[in-house]
Image (cartoon, grey):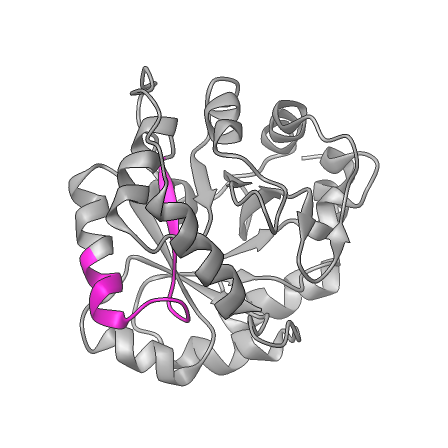
C-alpha cells in the first residue's frame, strides 16, 4: 500500500498547482509546543476523516470545529491530513484550521518533493511530516534542511531500526516520531515504540498510531515517549474533547 500511495503522490506532484501565498498568521513553534506540553505527555491531536486501513472514520466532519475542540481540551498541536485520495483530506483544511486555533498546525501528508514544501508554507502549515520509510535518507535530510530554511519545522517519522540508523548517520532530527503501524502491512503494535526509543539520541520522541486508551498512553509514556499523535481514537467518539479527557484519564483539564 505504501508504494501505491507514493506512486499516486508522484503523479500528483507532477501536476501540482501552488496556491496563492497565504496571508500568514504568526508562525507557531511545533518544537516548543512539544517541549513544554500542557500535560505530562504532549498531544498531537489529528483531524482524520478516513484512512486506507480503516475506511471512513467519521462522517460529516467540520475540520474547524474538531480542531477548536482539540485545542480547548488541551491538545498541544493539531495534525491536519491533506492527502485527498487515501485519507479524504485537503490542503485547504490547514488554512481553515490555522485561522481558528492558536496552537501549531502539523501538515500530515506524504512529502516527497521540494514543491510540497513551498505548498506547505503557502497554506499556513507550521510543521510537516517527513516519513523515513518513504524517502531516501539523504534526500530526507535535504528536505529537512530546506524546510527549516523556509520556516517549517519537521516531524521525522521512523518505524524500523534500519531507518533509524540510516537517518542518524546523517543528522539528528529535533523531533522523531515512532510509527507503531507498519505502512506496508498496516499491522500496529505499541511494542514498536518500546523497541525504537532506546536507539534514539536526545530528542523529542512522539509515539504515533495504535493509541486508544489511558493504558496505551501509560505504555508509551513509560517506554520513553514525550508526546503522542492520536487521530482515530478521538475521531470515532461523538465528542472529541471528551475523548481527549478520557484518553488522559481525566474528566476535565
The residue under the point 53% across, 65% down is 4
The residue under the point 49% across, 27% down is 92
Is 135 included in the stretch rendered in magenta? yes
Q: Is residue 206 visible?
A: no
User: What's the magenta region?
Assistant: 126-142
Q: From this viewpoint, which residue is outermost toward the right?
A: 238
Image quadrant assignment for residue 168? bottom left
Q: Quadrant of the C terminus?
A: top right
Q: In this view, does 154 lie above or below 140?
A: above
Tell which of 222 and 200 is nearer to you.
200
The residue under the point 76% across, 47% down is 57
Residue 39, percent from left and from top: 55, 45
Image quadrant assignment for residue 148? top left
Is 148 included in the stretch rendered in magenta? no
Residue 179, percent from left and from top: 52, 67
Q: Is residue 137 above or below residue 150?
A: below
Amino acid at each position: 500500500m505504501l508504494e501505491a500511495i507514493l506512486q499516486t503522490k508522484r503523479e500528483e506532484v507532477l501536476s501540482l498547482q501552488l496556491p496563492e501565498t497565504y496571508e500568514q498568521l504568526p508562525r507557531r513553534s511545533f518544537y516548543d509546543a512539544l517541549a513544554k506540553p500542557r500535560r505530562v505527555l504532549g498531544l498531537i491531536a489529528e483531524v482524520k476523516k478516513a484512512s486506507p486501513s480503516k475506511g471512513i472514520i467519521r462522517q460529516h466532519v467540520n475540520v474547524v470545529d474538531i480542531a477548536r475542540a482539540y485545542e480547548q481540551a488541551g491538545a498541544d498541536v493539531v495534525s491536519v491530513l491533506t492527502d485527498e485520495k487515501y485519507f479524504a483530506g485537503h490542503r485547504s483544511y490547514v488554512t481553515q484550521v490555522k485561522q481558528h486555533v492558536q496552537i501549531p498546525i502539523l501538515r500530515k501528508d506524504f512529502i516527497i518533493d521540494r514543491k510540497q514544501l513551498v505548498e506547505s508554507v503557502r497554506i499556513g502549515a507550521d510543521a510537516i511530516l517527513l516519513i523515513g520509510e518513504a524517502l531516501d535518507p539523504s534526500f530526507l535530510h535535504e528536505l529537512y534542511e530546506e524546510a527549516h530554511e523556509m520556516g517549517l519545522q519537521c516531524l521525522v517519522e521512523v518505524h524500523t531500526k534500519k531507518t533509524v540508523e540510516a537517518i542518524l548517520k546523517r543528522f539528528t532530527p529535533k523531533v522523531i516520531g515512532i510509527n507503531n503501524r507498519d505502512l506496508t502491512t498496516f499491522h500496529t503494535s505499541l511494542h514498536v515504540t518500546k523497541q525504537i526509543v532506546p536507539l534514539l539520541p536526545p530528542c523529542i520522541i512522539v509515539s504515533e498510531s495504535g493509541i486508544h486508551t489511558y493504558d496505551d498512553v501509560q505504555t508509551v509514556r513509560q517506554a520513553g515517549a514525550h508526546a503522542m499523535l492520536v487521530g482515530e481514537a478521538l475521531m470515532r467518539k461523538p465528542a472529541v474533547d471528551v475523548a481527549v479527557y478520557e484518553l488522559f484519564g481525566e474528566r476535565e483539564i
